[in-house]
Image (cartoon, rainbow, N blue to C red):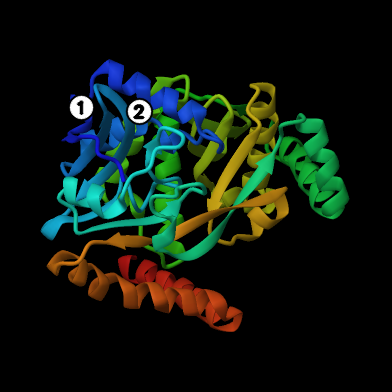
Amino acid sequence: MSSGRVHVLRPEDLGEGERQRWRELRAAAEVPRNPFMEPEFTAAVGLVRPGARVAVLYEGTEPAGFLPFERGPLGQGRAIGLGVSDCQGAILRPGLVQDTAELLRACSLSAFAFDNLEPEQRLFLPYAAEEHATFVIDVEKGYDTYESVLRAQSPKFLKTTLAKERRLGRQVGPVRFVFDERDPAVLRTLMEWKSAQYRRTGRRDRFAQEWITRLVGRLAQTRAPECTGTLSVLYADGRPVAAHFGLRSSSVLACWFPAYDPAFAKYSPGLVLHLRMAEAAAAEGIGLLDMGRGPAEYKDSLKTGELAVYEGAALRPGAGAALYWLSREPVRRAHAFVRAHPRVASLASRALRGAGRLRAGHRR
C-alpha cells in the first residue's frame, strides 16, 4: 500500500513539470502509447466537462502517478471522457503499489467506471467484469508488408477495394488523399455524416451532445508530439467522399470517428480511406492503428490482430456505489447477453436500423 500523498486537481491546474512527469511515466509503460492516455487529452476534456479531475500521487515531492477521472453525483466516478475515450486507466511509475480503495477514498469517489481499460492496469483489472477485443492494424514493418498480409488473409477484399478506388477515379474524378487536413469545414462535414450514420443505424448520436462536438473541436487544434488531432480525408474530383478524425502519437493512430458520403457507397470510400491512412501512418513511423472495440465488418477485413480492453467498475462500499450498481449493472449484463448470442445480436441490430428509419421518416 502506498503511503504517499494524493492531490486532486482540475486538469488546467497541473503544472508543466507535472505534465512532463506524466509523459515520462507514459513513455516508460510497456503498452502502446495510445494518445487517449496523454495529458493533452485530459486537458481537452477538462475544458468541456466541469467534473474532470486528476489525482496526482506523490512519493515525497515527486509525482509517481496520475489518475484522470470525472466525478458525478454521490462521488460516482468514471474514466476521463468515458463514452468516447478508447483507452483508459492510471499512469503510474513502474512498480508503484497503490491500494485501490485508498485511492478512491482520497479522490472522494464511491466508484470508478471504465469501459476501455488498457492491459497492465493492475490497479483496476481485478474489478473488470468483461474483456473485449480492440481491433488493430500493424504497420510496424511498413505498408507493403501490411498489404502482403491482406493478400494472404483476404486476397479478394484487397483486390476489390483497390479496383473500387481506381473506378472512383475514372467515374467521379481524380482521387486525392490528405492525411492531416486542417480545413475546419471538412471536419464539420465529417460530423454531419457521422450524425446521419448514427441516426440511420438507430444508435445514439454522439454529436448531438454538445460536449463531444466541443471536445473534437478542441482536439482538432491540439498539436503535441504524443497527442495530435488528425483529420484524414479522401477526395474525388476535389470533393470529400470519406473522412476520419482521430488522435495520433508518435507510434499509435487511434481511429475514432470514420464516415463517408453515402452517395459514393458503391466505391467503398471508407475502406479506401483506411488503406490510405495505414499507408500514410507507416510513412510517418507510426506502427499501429487502433480501430477500437466493437465488431464491424470493415474491421474484420482490415485488421491484422486484436488487443484486449476491459469493462467494469471499482466500487467502494457506500450509497454512491450501490446507486452505480443498480443503474449500470443490469444494462451491462443485458448487453453482454446480446453479444454472447449472435442471433439475438442480429435481431437487435435490425431493430435499431428499423427504429432509425422510422425516426428519419417522422422528421421528413
Tag of residue 12:
1
SS of the residue under disc 2: helix
Front one among 308 and 284? 308
Q: Quadrant of the C terminus?
A: bottom left
SS of the residue under disc 1: helix
The 10 Å Cα crowd at callout 1, few under 14, some 14 to 19, many 20 or more, is some
x, y (%) of residue 19?
Answer: 32, 22
Of the numbered discs 1 and 2, the one sitting upstream in the chain is: 1
Amino acid type of the residue tagged 1 in the rendering: Glu
Residue contact between numbered discs 1 and 2, judged by CB atoms under 8 Å: no
Residue 42: tell me if it is visible. yes
Compared to 254, does 103 lie above or below?
Answer: below
Front one among 57 and 22? 57
- Where is mark 2, residue-wise? 40
x, y (%) of residue 181?
Answer: 50, 25
Compared to 120, does 27 lie above or below?
Answer: above
Identify the residue shown where x is 76% and y is 29%. Answer: 142
In the image, is 270 to the left or to the right of 352? right
Name the image quarter holding residue 112: bottom left
